[in-house]
Image: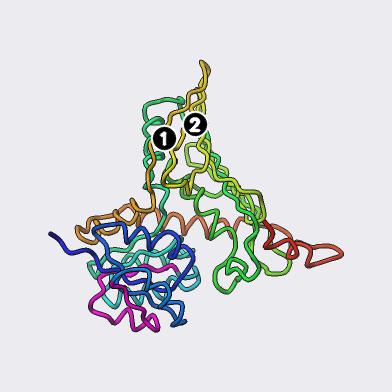
Amino acid sequence: MTAPVRIGVLGCADIARRRMLPAFAADPDSAVVAIASRDGDRAHALAAQYDGCAAVAGYETLLADPGIDAVYVPLPVALHSEWIERALRAGKHVLGEKPLTPDTATTARLFALARSSGLVLGENFMFPHHRRHQRVRQLIAAGAIGELRSFTGVFAIPPPPPGDIRYRSDLGGGALLDIAVQPLLAAWFFLGSDLEVHGARLRTHPVHGVDTGGAILLATPGGTTAQVVFGMEHSYKSAYELWGSEGRIVVDRAYAPPPDSRQVIRLERPHGIEELVLEPDDQCLNAVRAFSRAVRSPTRDPVEERAVVLARLLTDIRAADHSPPLRNRSNPHADHATYGQT
């Protein structure tokens, strides 16, 4: 029997605590053996929840441990490139949170470093690992809605609490890098790598200076369009729609469905509406399993192509945005006063 991939974790981020560490623990091909933090108490409290897991003081110490095969990096986006590169140079496979970096050249350089070192570099988008989206692809390929004309993706969440790192521009905060990347990747998933940005409008927080929402217009060279709407000052919505010459496919709770719930694909055609119900699927566990399999049997992974395309799109979106500064008015803190309410 092959020994599990020994995983070290850099930091105690919320996504690590809530989703990824339980998924690694549930994967028989993975074992979380160390959690590093600059806060020793946090590392000890989290490591104590997993048998055989050590708390480590400092990321550098974890990377120097020869007993670790791979590193999961859930740090803020602005720290990704530094610590992913350090992990690769330390001889570790890496699973980095999304997006790996918002810069095309940096993303390509990290993948080149991984290839030259014989290491796996993954970008932790989970929703492509849910069977529902593969089923949607099959429906499109079978002509269920005719020729695809457009994609619309929406993802928005209520305001995070005060002090959340998404309000920190120095750490790569903002809704574009944290939220818009999901429907942007869905657009790539269905329309391919030739997507081009044709317009963008971002809304900037008057106090924190990060983008809190916006809309993006994209298109393929063949004229199929995509629209992405996103934000972090909204009521919750997570959905996409594919519109064809003969019908529509609608998917709700698209990017983070509960692993124990049946998921629905709504197929609307001239002769009626059909709801296709799929059995529960755990996209987080599927993503972890895909990474551990890749570490054991490295092959060329489409993750590199999509990560580079996403970085290019993020760069082009920033360049396309010509939003005027948001001026509030009589009370420049009015928006901030609503943050943290539920």
The residue nearer to you, when weighing 320 against 35, is: 35
Instruction: List the residue tagged with mark 2.
Output: 249
Q: Where on the picture, by quarter, is residue 332?
A: bottom right
Q: In this view, does 97 lie above or below 224?
A: below
Point out the stretch of residues depicted in magenta. Answer: 52-74
Q: In this view, does 235 lie above or below 67?
A: above
Residue type at tag 2? Ile
Magenta-span inclusion, residue 127: no
The residue nearer to you, when weighing 316 against 275, is: 275
Mark closer to the chain start, 1 or 2: 1
Quadrant where the image shows the C terminus: bottom right
Secondary structure found at label 2: strand
Residue 103 in the image, given as x and y percentages of width and height: 47, 65
Q: Is residue 66 left or right of residue 226?
A: left
Residue type at tag 1? Val
Residue 148 in the image, given as x and y percentages of width and height: 47, 31
Q: Is there any visible trace of residue 74 in the rendered image?
A: yes
Q: How far apart are marks 1 and 2 (CA)?
A: 8 Å
Instruction: List the residue tagged with mark 1.
Output: 136
Q: Are marks 1 and 2 in contact (CB under 8 Å)?
A: yes
The residue sitting at 46% across, 34% down in the picture is 264
Q: Where on the picture, by quarter, is residue 318?
A: bottom right
Q: Where on the picture, by quarter, is residue 30?
A: bottom left
Which residue extends farthest left?
1
Q: Is residue 71 above or below residue 141?
A: below
Residue 341 in the image, given as x and y percentages of width and height: 69, 59
Q: Which colouring convention does the figure follow?
A: rainbow
